[in-house]
Amino acid sequence: MGANLKDLRRKIKSITGTKKITQAMQMVAASKMQKYEK
């Protein structure tokens, strides 16, 4: 059980990490789009 819990936590951490990265990329893309629109 302990090992499984550790694996789950590691997976959750990696998932949240990728979510943050994608959110940052979306923000960068949005700011670039605004620049082009101007």
Image (tube, grey):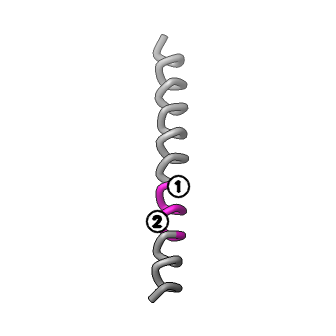
Type of amino acid at the residue the image marks with label 2: Ile
Q: Nearer the viewer, mark 2 or mark 1?
A: 2
Q: Give me the disc on residue 12.
A: 2
Question: What span is colored magenta in the figure?
Answer: 10-17
Q: At which x and y percent is residue 32?
A: 54, 25
User: In the rendered image of this protein, does residue 7 appear above or below residue 36?
Assistant: below
Type of amino acid at the residue the image marks with label 1: Thr
Q: At which x and y percent is residue 15?
A: 48, 61
Give the residue at x 51% y 61%. Answer: 13
User: In the rendered image of this protein, does residue 25 appear above or below residue 4?
Assistant: above
Is-magenta flag for residue 38?
Answer: no
Disc 2, disc 1: CB below 8 Å? no
Name the residue at the front extreme. Answer: 2
Q: Which residue is mark 1?
A: 18
Give the residue at x 53% y 38%. Answer: 24
Tell which of 35 and 13 is nearer to you. 13
